[in-house]
Image (spheres, coloured by chain):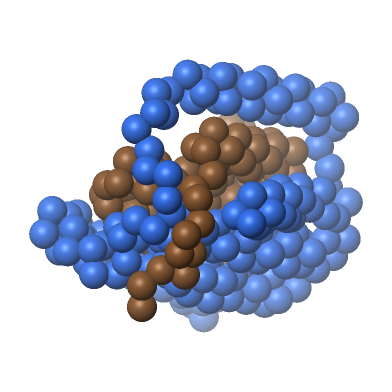
Amino acid sequence: MEKIIFYSLSTLAVFSALMVVLSKKPIHSLLYLLLCFFTIAGHYVLLNAQFLAVVHIIVYAGAIMVLFLFSLMLLNLNIKEELQKTVWMRIIAVISGGLLLVALVGVLKGLDTSAGPMLASTQIGLMKNIGNVLFNEYMLPFEVASILFLTAMVGAVMLGKDEEKVVKK
Amino acid sequence: MNTVVEGFKLMPIENYIVLSALLFVIGILGVLVKRNALVVFMSVELMLNSVNLLFAAFSVYHNDTSGQVIVIFTMVVAAAEVAVGLAILVLTYRTNHSIDINLLNKLKH
């Protein structure tokens, strides 16, 4: 059962990821990216990382997708993409990407993976355990992350406003 | 709320490694091949997601919650990156009237 779910989710994830790259229109890429995010959320559920699955859907499908969609529509960029890199560039990209894939899989396969639990009913993905670790061990990084987020917010607002002022002058 | 996947066996970690590597390489291909800056951003998101998935898988296999906490931090950084990146994208669109990344080599000249 878990094999069927895993392989169908993986196939869907890889297919939609490929379509992100292969689609001509940016809006199609965006929607395929959304599909890819949902399959990855399914993978989190399969790993019994429920909190991650929920947060993933909220953050990616909720926030980041909306940001992308807004910029896509505000800029009116949904033109068919004539911009293409040269054929040579693309061939080189594919070759180097394939080599990287081989290298990554080769390196990571050599890991010692004997020490894994077999059942997926581990409790570590539940909200209680994640909260315990996050607010005890990772308290300082958590606060730093919040400062980073505030900075990013201020930066985004400033960047968005700057041009307007120049136009008014 | 306990477990949704009660009684399921975990897939071997190699499957997750291969899946994440595939997604990561597809993201890299997107960055290398595309000239639309928006799609390049999407490919970066794809790469971040593949790494997140691998983090979560390893955290479950080693029975250690820290991996999943790191995934949350990665999500925070990704959200910040997208917010600032899209703001910069809007600015470049206003100045160049295009989001072709090949136009962004003006520092060179």
Q: Is residue A52 left or right of residue B103?
A: left
| For residue B22, above or below residue A135 | above
Q: Quadrant of the N terminus of chain A?
A: bottom right
Query: Between B22 and A60, which is closer to the camera in this rendering?
Result: B22
| For residue A103, above or below residue A39 | above
Res A140 quadrant in image: bottom left
Identify the residue at the far front of this view.
B7
Instruction: Please tell me the colour of chain A.
Output: blue
Query: Could you tell me which residue is drawn at 23 percent across and 63 percent down?
Result: A129
Query: Could you tell me which residue is drawn at 47 percent across and 59 percent down?
Result: B7
| For residue B51, above or below residue B90 | above
Could you tell me residue A21's position as x and y percent? Answer: 75, 48
Could you tell me residue B50's position as x and y percent? Answer: 54, 46
Q: Is residue A49 visible?
A: yes
Could you tell me residue B78's position as x and y percent? Answer: 44, 56
Which chain corresponds to the colour brown? B
